[in-house]
Amino acid sequence: MIQLRPRFACTLLVLALAAPPAFAVNKDMVQLQTQVQELQTAVARLQQSNDERMGVLKDLVQQNSDSVNKMSVAVDALQQQMRAQNDSTNARLDQFSGQVQTLSDSLDEVKARLNNLDKALQSIQDQQQSINAALQNLAPSPAAAPDATGAAIPTDSSTLPPPIAGKKGKPLAATPAGAADASASSPALGSRLVAPAPSALYRTALSDYMAAHYPLASTEFAEIIRSNPADPLAGNSFYYLGEIDYRAGKYATAIKDYDRVLEQFPNSTKAPVSHLHKGMALFETGKREAGITELRALITRFPNSPEAAQARSKLTGMGVAVTPHRPAQ
């Protein structure tokens, strides 16, 4: 019994010495677990905060996307409206150009008629002066004039000048009846009073062109060019031949016709529209750069013409500068 007590005391001592370290380890573990729990809680809060921020960011991105889509739709609608306005403007310019051309054609016709009337009037005046001079030179004296031998010179109707014809070919009063048809026998007077053929044929050709009788109009315009190649109406005829070829899709031939106007009749009223339609024909044949050069030449030569306005609109619609860019020196 006495021997068991020391052993028991040792055991108690060992237990007493071992107890404090175990208690300290448990306390550190509890603190570590507490810190881990707090860290997990902070991470969860951070994750929640990030999720909320991502949600807000997604909403902002969605709103921006919706705004961009709406803006894109608005831009498309604006572009379509601008295209429609541009097409309407071009159509109005084409209509206005056609009206100007029709007015120019009518003016050319009026000028041709006035010129013919002036020539006919001048011819009549010349004939009247010739007749008056003949009457003054051939008119006999009221009494028979004696000759050197004292014999009277008889007055005979054969020595009188031709009469001046009145209405319906009847001789006027105080004129000899035997010379009533003298004016009719003069071919020069009748030929001078007839209107020149080019103007009459041009009016006929223009009328056929306006009525869309293109084959007949082509023949008539070609005849004007053949018979009077230097006449200004020949320049107009080349232009209308170009128009007929352009409408038929013969763009290469139309370009040659327009070149005839620009080269042989550079000051013609058809020069601006010949530049414009030549440029359009070049575009149709795929010669883009040549067409651009032609439209720029039109704008340079005739800047204030309606055709120049159409050329500017065409170049702008193609995204091409009206004037060529010069490289910096």
Image (cartoon, rainbow, N blue to C red):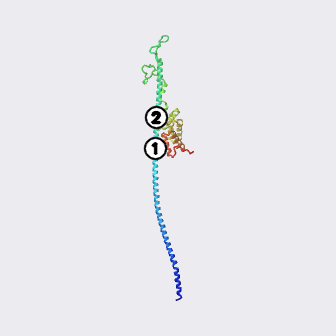
Question: Is 175 situated above or below 12?
Answer: above
Residue 222 versus residue 71: which sits nearer the camera? Answer: 71
Mark 2 crowdedness (10 Å alpha carbons): few <14, some 14-19, many ≥20: few
Q: How many labels does the image show?
A: 2
Q: Position of residue 244 (x, y in %)?
A: 50, 39
Residue 49 seen anywhere in this rendered image of the structure: yes
Residue at the image point whose x is 51% and y is 78% from the top: 20
Residue 315: x %, y % from top left: 50, 44
Query: Percent position (x, y) of residue 49?
Result: 47, 64
Q: Which of marks 2 and 1 is nearer the N terminus?
A: 1
Can residue 284 be seen at all in this image of the molecule? no
Q: Name which residue lies at 46% across and 25% down.
A: 125
Q: What element carries label 1?
A: helix
Give the residue drawn at x 47%, y 19%.
136
Question: Which residue was labeled with disc 2?
Answer: 107
Callout 1 environment at 10 Å: few (<14), some (14 to 19), or many (20+)? Answer: some
Disc 1 target residue: 89
Residue at position x 49%, y 73% in the image: 31
**On the image, which quarter does residue 143 sit in?**
top left
Task: Report how far apart the C-alphas of labels 2 and 1 lie in the structure.
Answer: 26 Å
Report the amino acid beneath label 2. Answer: Leu
Who is closer to the viewer here, 317 or 210?
A: 317
**Camera-nearest residue between 316 and 105:** 316
Q: Amino acid type of disc 1? A: Thr
